[in-house]
Image (cartoon, rainbow, N blue to C red):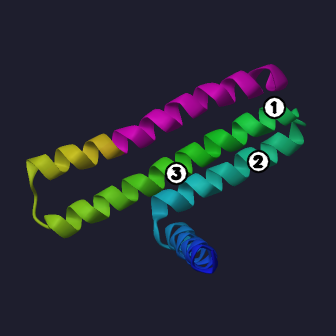
Amino acid sequence: MKNFIIGRVKSIKYATKGMFLLATTEHSVMAQLFTGILITCAGFYYNLSPIEWAIQCLCIGLIVTAEGLNTGIEAICDYIQPNFDPKIGFIKDIAAGAVCFAAFFSLIVGIIIYYPKIF
């Protein structure tokens, strides 16, 4: 049991380090986090309901998570094949497309939440 707890604490330490690295070194993640902060401020301004807050937080988390996974996939691809390769390009495009899906559907959720409040 002691080794299990020590292992979980180490896992949290590595995950926290990864979050910090993403937030401080990756410009795309910085942009997503900045947008998330702006949307959070808008949530306070428009007095979101608890359900709206939950959905908004899920959308922000989805986008940042997708961006982090995309960054990891791109880093692995660049490590495996530093030169241009159409197959690697295909993989990287698919990973970036996943982020685009997350952003697109989060935009729809944002419109559903904020349109009635603004207009």
Amino acid type assigned to the residue bearing label 3 in the image: Thr
Q: Label 1, on which residue?
A: 51
**Which of the marked residues, 3 or 2, is nearer the chain's N terminus?**
2
**Where residue 75 appears, x then y in whole percent?**
30, 65
Is 14 located above or below residue 96 in the figure?
below
Left or right: where 58 falls relative to 23 = right
| Residue at the image position 44 percent from the left and 42 percent from the top | 99
**Which of the marked residues, 3 or 1, is nearer the chain's N terminus?**
1
Magenta stretch encompasses residue 62: no
Q: Which of 95 and 2 is in front in this view?
A: 2
Q: For mark 3, give the secondary structure.
A: helix
**Which of the marked residues, 1 or 2, is nearer the chain's N terminus?**
2
Q: For mark 1, give the secondary structure.
A: helix
Quadrant of the frame with the C terminus: top right
Highlighted range, magenta? 96-119
Q: Label 2, on which residue?
A: 40
Left or right: where 45 falls relative to 10 = right
Magenta portion: prevailing SS class: helix
Q: Could you tell me if the residues under marks 3 and 2 are in contact, i.e. CB atoms within 8 Å?
A: no
Amino acid type assigned to the residue bearing label 2 in the image: Thr
Q: Distance between the residues labelled 3 and 1?
A: 21 Å
Q: Which mark is residue 65?
A: 3
**Labels 1, 2: front one:** 1
Q: Could you tell me if the residues under marks 3 and 1 are in contact, i.e. CB atoms within 8 Å?
A: no
